[in-house]
Amino acid sequence: MLKILLPFTLWFMPFFFPVKSPKAAAPAGSHVEIKKRGKLYQLYLNGSPYFIKGAGGYSHLSDVKKYGGNSLRLWSTIGAKKYMDSAYALGLTVTLGLDMELERRGFNYSNKKAVAEQFERLKKEVLAFKDHPALLMWGVGNELDQFAKNYEVWDAVHDLVKYIHEVDPHHPTTTMLAGVPLHHVKEIMKRCPDLDVLSLNAFLDLPNVRGHLNEANYKGPYMVGEFGASGYWEALMTPWGAFIEETSTQKAKLFEDHYKDAIATHTDRCLGSYVFYWGYKQARTHTLLSLYLEGGEEMSMIDAMQKNWTGQYPQNRAPEISPLGIDDKQTHLGVYLKPGTAHMVYTDCKDPENENLYYYWEILHESQEKKEGGDREEKPIAIPGLIRDGKGKALSFITPEKEGAYRVYAYVYDGHNNVATANAPFYVKK
C-alpha cells in the first residue's frame, strides 16, 4: 500500500507543506576560482584547471584563438560588451578592467567625495558585466602605483574588491602594477588583504619578477598582466635621449625566452599571462610594442607566441632582420649627421621559407610625445623627399635640413602577411 501511495503523496506535497523560496539561480556566466594545495595555486574555470594564455588588445581577436591563446585582456568597460561577445563566440575568456582614476592625472585618493563617486560608478560597471559568460577575472585598476605616492589608493581598491566579492563570488579580483614596486606591494598586502591575485606588468625585467615578489614577502598567486618587448624606459639611450629599439627578430627571441623562463616554469604560483600589445599602438615608436603593423601585417613576435602557446611555430614565419647600421657608426653611441648630406643605412634579412622579400624604408621625426602608462600617442608623419634609393637591403638617403632628432625604419615583407621591422635613431646637427 505504501508503494502505491508514495507517488500520490509526493505529488500533492506542495499543497500540504509551506513552499520554500527557490534557491538562487545558477550564474548566467562562468564560475572561476583559485584553489590552493600546499604552496601550489591553480586557477579553475567551471571546475577545470585553466592556465591563462592571453593577449592584451582590441583587434585581431580571432588570431588569439587561431594561434593557441585562450584569453583577452581589456583595460576598461568602454565598448566591452562588443569585445566580450566576440571573445565568447571564439571561446575566449576576458579579464575585464575597471578603470580607476590615476594620481598621475591629478586624482586625489584622500578626497572622500571623489573616491565615493568613483566607487558608485564602478559598482554599476560590475553589475553590468558580472554575469557575462566570457568574464574570467576583474582587473581593479591598471598601474595605479605609477608615479603614485598616496597609499590610500589601495583602500579604494580594497573597498571595490569587497563589493565584488559580495555581488559576484564567481570571479576573482586582481590589480595590475607597473613592475614590482616593493613599497606598493607591501601596502597592498596590508590594505587590501582580500585581493585574490596580484598582477605585474613587466617587460625587460620580467625574469626578475619572482625574485622581487619574494623580496616583498608576497607568497600568494600572481599573473603577468602585460609582457613584451623591452620598454623605452629600460633600453639603451643615445646622448640626446632617444632609445634603441630591438628588431622584431630580437623581440621574438625575447618573447620565447621570457615566457619559458619567467612564466611557463613558474606555474606553482603564476596563473598565466597577457602578451602586450595584440594590435597596433604608438608608444614612442609605432613598432615598439605593436605585434601588428597598421595594415595588419604580423611580426615574428606572433610566431613566438604561437610557439609559446602550442609548442609549434606556424608553417609560414615572418622574416628575420638584422639591426640597422648607419654608415660605419655605432647607433647606440649616437649617430650625428650634417644637414643635407648623403648617407647609407644597411640591414640584412632572410626568410625561413626562402621566399622573395620586399623592402620598404621611411624616415620620420623622432616622436616628441612623452606620454606614460599607455596613454594615447600619435605617430609622426613620414618625411618625403629624403630617400634616393631604398629598394633593397641598403638605403641611400639625404638628411633633412632642419636640425633635430630623426629615426629611419626598415620593413621587410614576405608576401604572406608577415613583416620584419627594424629602426635606428640619428640626429641632424650643423
Image (cartoon, rainbow, N blue to C red):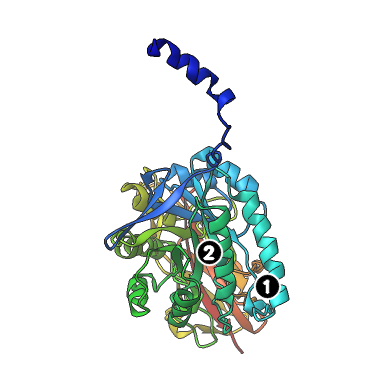
Classify residue 427 by image quadrant.
bottom right
Disc 2 designates what residue?
287
Mark closer to the observer (2, 1): 1
The secondary element bearing badge 1 is classed as: helix
Image height check: is 157 above or below 146? Answer: above
Residue 415 at least partly seen? no
Image quarter of the C terminus = bottom right
Q: Residue at x 39, y 9 (%)?
A: 1
Q: CA distance from mark 2 to mark 1?
A: 37 Å
Residue 197 at least partly seen? yes
Foreground residue among 152 and 23: 23
The circle drawn on residue 115 is 1
Query: Which callout, 2 or 1, points at the residue further toward the start of the chain?
Result: 1
Amino acid type of the residue that numbered disc 1 sits on in the rendered structure: Val
Residue 216 in the figure: left or right of residue 147: left
Residue 259 in the figure: left or right of residue 189: left
Horizontal and vertical percent for residue 415?
A: 48, 46
Horizontal and vertical percent for residue 339?
A: 62, 83
Image height check: is 362 above or below 414? Answer: below
- Answer few, some or many: residues within 10 Å of disc 2's Cα (few below 14, many 20 plus, some between 14 and 19): many
Amino acid type of the residue that numbered disc 2 sits on in the rendered structure: Thr
The secondary element bearing badge 2 is classed as: loop
Foreground residue among 427 and 106: 106
- Answer few, some or many: residues within 10 Å of disc 1's Cα (few below 14, many 20 plus, some between 14 and 19): some
Foreground residue among 47 and 10: 10
Horizontal and vertical percent for residue 262?
A: 33, 65
